[in-house]
Image (cartoon, rainbow, N blue to C red):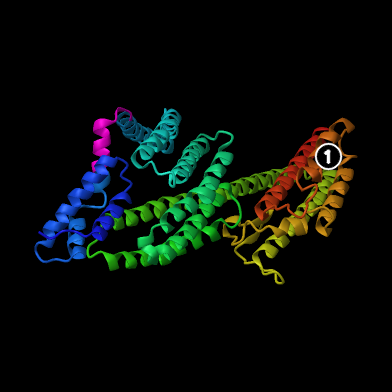
Amino acid sequence: MPELSIQNIERVTRDVKKQEIVFSHLVDELIDHICCDVENEMQDGLTFLEAYNKVKQKISPRRLKEIQEETLYAVDTKYRYMKNTMKISGIAGTVLLGFGALFKIQHWALAGAMATIGAVILAVVFIPSALGVLWKETHSRKKLFLFISAFLAGMCFILGTLFKIQHWSGAGIIITLAALFGILFFIPALLVSKLQDQENKFKKPVYILGAIGLICYVGGMFCKIQHWPLATTLMVLGMIILCVIVFPWYTWNSWREESHISPRFLYMVIGLLLIIVPVALINLNLQYSYEEGFYSHQEQQQALSGYLSRNNNSLMTRYHDSLSYSQMEQLHAKTISLLTLIGDVQKKMVQESEGEPVKSALSQDQIRQTETGTEIQYNKLSNAFHNASVRDFLAPGCNTREELNSALTEYGKSISGMIPEEDLQKYTSLLDPSLYFPGTMTDGTSISLMSGMHSLELLKNSLLTVESKILTDIVRHR
């Protein structure tokens, strides 16, 4: 019967120990069992490498770990307790959190309670018990930092998601911690662990690119949740690296070694889908809710503006033969003049945001003149969150801002003789520019076009409200 050389036995021993088998007696038994199987295969005339590869195909990469887990489960009570706790808490926490999310989407009762209990079970029970199980199975000090960083990132992510769903304070801080733990500690630790594998030298560039792609993608998703800039750029870059470069490259390298599709490949495909599809949906939902929320607010303000304008025009028509009509007409003319000025400012801001740095642009379907004045079609703007327009037209010291301030001051003076002194203050306070426009803008201050336009819409409605009240007072005291 063929016998293995010392070098052959060392090769088998090295491969078994790489599986992180921590029971010394179990290690010896596994090595002896594999060596015997290899010697039996060599009786058919196979070389050591041929026989050893044939034996390894019989023993799945996971089987040695399963044997150790079964042994630990049988002889170690503490391990058995932690393993059961991990399984039960993992299932219970996931089910509760899943149903909590479903109930939250459907606006059913007990959604918050189930999501909270599920998240707490996962973060406080499942993750610590899983960390204990992994330590029992490996006793690898080299991977201890990897395990701890992974569970800290996971714990913060679960709790941050819970706080975000429940609209509790501190959600942004916890999600920030999760992103930092993942980007600064977990992904680099995982990369180092993979680079230490000497048998996969040709895969090291793939691992490095994969880590870069993950960092970009996680960072982009975090920026998207926090509504920070560069979110889309980072997410697109991360997806290109992971899906277009890393995944095909890794698959090609793996198929050079394996003649069949391994479970690891299937897990990678499913894992990528689990990353891409949900996060893409979340991204679309965040983009939709973020922009649509602004659009609906603007449309509501414009609808209110149209109502107030028609109401004031109706008052002017109704009291056309009144003795006070000349005073009412004077006020109405000044109001229209000021509304026209505000509309011109809105038009200029949209032109700048829609154009190039040295060329303004405005499409006919983005703005229209109605019977009640200028109306912006906000949902048709291609650059609705442009950051320069507010600085150029509404910041303190710019010409347009000074023009608006002067016009509002003159309007306040013109109404002072139309109403009693005790009512003047409450009306002029609605026309204070500091209520609507930024007081100071430092170099780092960034206010989007939509925010600036919303302030102008509020100013228009305040102006129309003041006009309506004064017209009513004039008619009442005629």
Q: Which residue is mark 1?
A: 428
For the residue pair 250 and 334, the one nearer the viewer reads as 250
Q: Main secondary structure of the magenta part?
A: helix
Label 1: which secondary element: helix
The residue stretch that appears in magenta: 67-78
Q: Is residue 427 left or right of residue 87?
A: right
Residue 467, horizontal then vertical, whole percent: 78, 42
Residue 339, horizontal then vertical, whole percent: 76, 52
Q: Is residue 146 left or right of residue 355?
A: left
For the residue pair 344 and 73, the one nearer the viewer reads as 73
Q: Residue shown at 33%/46% (left/top)? A: 20
Q: Quadrant of residue 84?
A: top left
Residue 363, horizontal then vertical, whole percent: 62, 67
For the residue pair 339 and 71, the one nearer the viewer reads as 71
Q: Is residue 141 in sight in this rendering?
A: yes
Q: Residue shown at 53%/47% (left/top)? A: 179
Q: Residue shown at 81%/41% (left/top)? A: 322
Residue 47 part of the magenta segment: no
The quadrant of the rendering that contains the N terminus is bottom left
For the residue pair 43 and 235, the one nearer the viewer reads as 43
Q: Is residue 478 in sight in this rendering?
A: no
Q: Is residue 378 left or right of residue 131?
A: right
Q: Is residue 438 left or right of residue 192?
A: right
Q: Amino acid at mark 1?
A: Thr
Residue 74 part of the magenta segment: yes
Q: Quadrant of residue 377?
A: bottom right
